[in-house]
Image: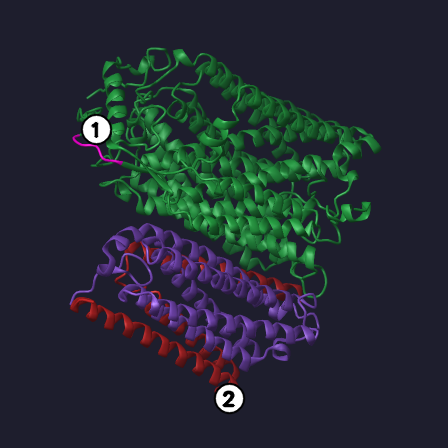
Amino acid sequence: MKRQPLLHPGLNLGSTDEYSHDVSEPIIFGFWVFLMADLVLFAILFATYASMSVQGQAGGPTPIDVFDLPSAFIETMLLLTSSITFGMASLALKYKADSLHLVFWLVLTFCLGAGFIGMELRDFWVMIQQGAVPQRSGFLSSFFLLVATHGIHVTAGLFWMLVLLLQLRVFGRTTEVKLRLMRLALFWHMLDIVWVCIFTFVYLFGVAQ
Amino acid sequence: MTDKHVETYTQDFRSYCIGGLLALILTSLAFGLVVFEVLPNFERLIAISVLAVAQIIVHFRYFLHISWHSHRDDLQLVLFTSLILFLMVGGTIWILFNLHEQMM
Amino acid sequence: MTAESSFSLLGILTAQDISFVHTFEHPGMSEFIDASAGGVMVMGGIIVIALLTYYRGWHALWCDWLTSVDHKKVGIMYIVVAFVMLARAIIEGVLMRYQQSIAVNDPGILSPDHFGQLFSTHGSIMIFFVAMPFVTGMMNYIMPQQIGARDVSFPLLNAISLWLTAAGAALVMISLVVGKFSTGGWTAYPPYTGIEFSPGEGVDYWIWSISLASIGSTLTGLNFATTIYKNRAPGMTLFRMPLFCWTSLCTSILMIFAMAPLTIATLMLALDRYAGFHFFTNDLGGNMMNYANLFWLFGHPEVYILILPAFGVFSEVISTFSGKTIYGYKSLVIATMSIAVLSFTVWLHHFFTMGQGANVNVIFGIATMLIGVPTGVKVYDWLLTMVRGRIRLTTAMLFSVMFLVTFVIGGLTGVILANPPVDFAVHNSLFLVAHFHNMVIPGVLFGMIAGYQFWFPKAFGFRLAERWGKVSFWCWSFGFYLTFMPLYVLGLMGAMRRTVEWFRPEYLGWLQVSFVGALLLFSGFLFLCVQLVVSIRQRDQRRVPAGDPWDGRSLEWSNSSPPPEYNFAVIPDVTGQDAFTRIKQQGQAYASPIAYEDIVVPKNSIVAPVIGIAAIMFGFALVWHIWWLVVFSFVCMWGAVIARSFVTETERVIPASKVRADHEAWLQQVRECATTPREQENTSVNVGRAEVLT
């Protein structure tokens, strides 16, 4: 079978909802462009962290002193799983006629995301207790800004998910709601990619050196 | 669901499963390399960087559905973004580390 | 409520921060100038409010303009913001030139602190609140019409971008009256702008006004890029687009990628100042060099964000007023794209002297010189467009020709500065000031004025008075050379930029010439205002209802002037470059379409003004540490966005019958119009229907 050409990034609705599929192209493309701008933002934070984590320790704690690698690993697993569950939500949006599956997977994703944020806050708290506060050194400033910017993005994603759950209830599966869910999916998967970079280049590099 | 939909459903479902599985494996591998201190230091850093890049490609391919079949606009955008990110991150790191050496 | 708690409600704001109170308590020439500027602004505001009330304009202003999401109205509002801010920034420029021309072994009239505020506001306003809105407004108005679209892809987002930019501009204006602005220059380099050396609200004003504007620009960029990629008329392939659309596309892409470094740099500076972080501080691992790096990662593409649309305008103007297709279309497109990409590879040339190794400097120096190549290609293409054309020296064309000459001189000094060793000698001197004014005034301002002269009849339905336009042109041109050529000389004599007082008498003559030039530049601006007033008063003899006063080549000229809100009654089918010229030559212009359809247009929305006003409050509250207002305005902004997502009726339909009636009436009017030969295009014969020569 020949593959249908993809109109835009993310799961295409295709023949399951022709109308929404047709109007989705410019809207999702616009959001995709926004995500690229957002990636640049993260790239700048990474570049800053790359230099400050080496040059800006100022005699204070080093990465290996303050990073809790097992905790970061669990956070990574939570976020990766949430990406898979959001994938299942996307499939439910595309193929299932009822909203039950969709809501189930969304709620599960929400819980995983909230768990991630909870663990991250706990990590921050432990670091602050050890005196590794952002005011201590350039390294810690850039660490907190990079990781917290990701965390704020995830939190915004959680709020967005709540609003969309409400809209699913109020409006049902209208084209607008579907397109918003598809954009949230892109947002969520993209944050996952950013986290993969944080896990590798911040946590693993920090401990491996 | 019509028959045609069943078929694409299986395709899409498989995509997320493969992607999820690969992502979990790659992350665990990288984690394992660091925790069990396999390989000498420098090679280990190279290895986990390669694993991260592989995982990014997996995410793009299986979660974001970006591939060579994508719309040309999307592909152009991703490639152009990669170029800009490379210039910005590479340039910044190069400049700041060079500066740091001169200041020592 | 006690006095203490009422003061804490206003954060750290006190009565002494109001410039009038401050001047009353500490009278002096510098303070007096500061207070009068604030007074003029307040009076201006009061007069506008009074006039609106007297003429009962509030309703029209709100319903037709402020809540509108029509790309044409948004574009016009951008340009209005740009003009208002231009007035302030030019006056500041003249004031600085006056100060320097009298301050040889003499303190002059301005205190160093006031002088610092002047060069900071002058630079910040000119870049972020004159050039950016002017360019964005021009793209807003023209680009969708040129690609045959009814609006941009995200009309509401477009209005939100406008309001965020306007909110940034409003914060800079508020700083005239409440508190002080930064003295750190438009680049705001730390550690000087850190909390240790710049306590107080000045730098915070800079940070938040620039942040708001940069977010607005990012959103504009993604909106325009999506529009150009996804919203073109059938047949309008990328390589059939007018050059202005190409430059808009490249500018949008630059906006998408280049604004983020600025947003991050200002955010880090804010964290240093507000929360004691150590990104750019002297101690505890801070690295202020990274600020220069991040700022120019944004700053250099920014130069091309501004200049590329002007290049687009020149391409359109030169081609139209030479009566020829643009020469070397493809080479111009490729040059535009090369410039856009190369602009990301040269940012280090703004800080050659920072201390990195010579190898780094050399690579960036070479990359810088490389940009000269595509720019040179463009200059030759424009020249060759004029060769054997029937050139009409209208005001827009005069500005374009003067641009070519002046810009090449500026480009040459740029190549000189791209040599790291030479740059070490003239870094931070007036030579540099002369160089970038030499790029930006012809490259951006002349382009925008040329575009304003060219498209004004399209937007408002009547031509501008050419006579006053030409007077203004000569003032701008001579003013430019008189002001900035002496600065090259002064720079080579060793005069540094941003100096409030001199001790070398040999500077005096050059500085005085420069001041005279600044006065000429200011009169150039005044004559533009005169031109506008005169043209409005004579509008009945200047009307061009048929919509094509210059024998235009692209689709925007195929509509009435001003165009209907839906731009095209029927979306045109494009068969090649210079779409409208082809239609005219095939004799198909102004033919009745076969069928009309209902047209869906977006409804007005109060979301954008709500976000804009909340953004002003947000910025103001952050500057003055009014934390409750920070939270409140933040909730307002996002609350408006979420509330909007629950609104389902966001569009309205214009029935086909109404479209037909309006369009056919206009077509009838056009058919009755006499055609205008080109020799008479600046007389009242010109009602906007061009004579077609085949």
**Where is the C terminus of chain C found, in terms of image quarters?**
top left
Magenta highlight on residue C107: no
Badge 1: residue crowd in 10 Å (few <14, some 14–19, many ≥20): many
Which chain gets the purple colouring? A
- Mark 2: which secondary structure? loop
Q: Main secondary structure of the magenta part?
A: loop
- Mark 1: which secondary structure? helix
- In the rendered structure, the residue with mark 2 lies on which chain? B
Q: Which residue is mark 2?
A: B36
Q: Is residue A143 above or below residue A66?
A: above
Q: Amino acid at mark 1?
A: Ile
Task: Give the residues in magenta.
Answer: C594-598
Q: Which residue is mark 1?
A: C583
Which of the 4 quarters of the picture holds residue A21?
bottom left
Of residues A57 and A98, the one drawn nearer to the viewer in this rendering: A98
- In the rendered structure, the residue with mark 1 lies on which chain? C
User: What distance separates the C-alpha of mark 1 from that of mark 2?
Assistant: 73 Å
Say whether residue C339 is left or right of residue A23: right
Residue C522 screen position, x and y as percent: 59, 23
Q: Colour of chain C?
A: green
Q: Colour of chain B?
A: red
Q: Is residue C348 above or below residue C23?
A: below
